[in-house]
Amino acid sequence: MRHKRHIFWHTGDMPSQPPVAATPMAFARAMVEAYAQYGKDPSRALEMAQITPSALQQTNARITAWQMERLSETAMRELDDEALGWFSRRLPWGSYGMLARASISAPTLYVALSRWCRHHGLIAPDITLTLSTAGDTASITLTENATPPAHGHGAFAQVKEEPAKRAGDTEQKHHALGLPQTPQPNRIPEPFREFCMVSVLRNVLGVACWLIDSRITLLQADFPFEPPPHADAYAVLFPGPTRFQQARAAIAFDAEYLKLPLRRDEKSLQQMLQHALPLTVHQYRRDRLLVQQVRQLLSAQPQDTHSAEALAALLNVSPRTLHRQLREEGATLQALKDEVRHGKASELLLRSQRPIKQVAEAAGFQNEKSFIRAFKTWSGQTPAEFRRSATPGT
């Protein structure tokens, strides 16, 4: 690029594997709009990301994760705004790194995310991030606040007002005429609203995964706008159920993740900050709660077959990913099945007088002989011997 800037397509920094284009082009257009708000030219950023002007205008076009990283980083550096025009004031380069530094010393993810949400409000008062729990579910909610005046800084103070583009003009005219002001719940400027909410929630999710070195499986993602034309992309951005037209933007996940200790130190933080954008763009692969989640699913109905395909679908991963992540945690699906069946059978043998055949069925075995053989492998005793040895006076 340094020697042939007139050549738009180049391969020097392209990924070695064929990339998958899944990120909506609408997000690239939002970044171009940020350049317009700052009165700057986005050509270099688009060139770096290998996005042609014609592709930019294609409504349903998608870009790769690599392109998203290049465009985002170039835009953030050139505009010196990690928020890319979302808020009433800039977030200078390094702002989110400062939030990460403030969270790295926390003992658990709960404390780290609490700090992140609190400190985010200090640098970007336009929105409030709230961490909360309800039963077994934790959630991070994004609430839009009344936007404070720009006072000479921020993207919207950098360029001349254009009445046709300014959402606040109508409200100001109504106020001048003494008319009731129109309620305006959407405080983030409309060209950036979707991109802002998606990015902020993906950012905090990516950092949370990195802090505990684990994928955080989402139970649900909510957004307060109508389904966009690229709504199918949300299955990649937020794997799991996604709902639109909700009261707030939020993500929900198992509250057990909040109890996990952080696995990062200052050295790893410095390394991460050198290349932080992949945390927002890519899904974290490893899930430290996966073994527990599989065990819970197996325990709920131990008599079922529980194929890898069925379990993977419930966990929003592929069967291959399920097996790989279990292997990384030193477990296998068959071993977990045996553990759950053994526990269920032992409980029934000790706490009930059910015949061995019924215990076998409840533990997920199709016949009594295979159950007896498996139980002896697990415990060194047949089911009948196990029951007798645990019964006083026998």
Image (spheres, rainbow, N blue to C red):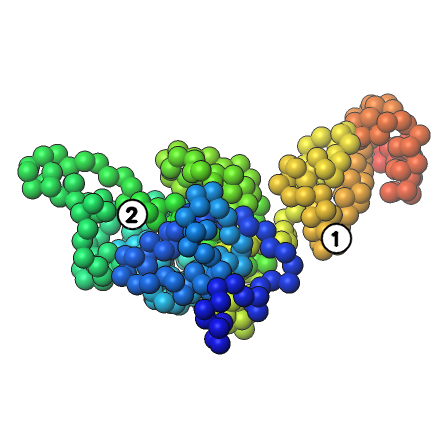
- The image shows residue 252 at horizontal and vertical percentages of 49, 42
Name the residue nearer the viewer: 64 or 190: 64
Q: Quadrant of residue 260?
A: bottom right
Q: Which element is circle 2 on?
A: loop
Residue at the spot of label 1 = 327
Residue at the spot of label 2 = 189
81 is higher (above) or lower (below) than 196:
below
164 left or right of 338?
A: left
Q: How many marks?
A: 2
Question: Dividing the image into 4 quarters, which one contains the C terminus?
Answer: top right
200 left or right of 148?
A: right
315 left or right of 145?
A: right
Name the residue nearer the viewer: 240 or 13: 13
Q: Residues within 10 Å of mark 2 (few under 14, many from 20)?
A: some
Name the residue nearer the viewer: 6 or 179: 6
312 left or right of 103?
A: right
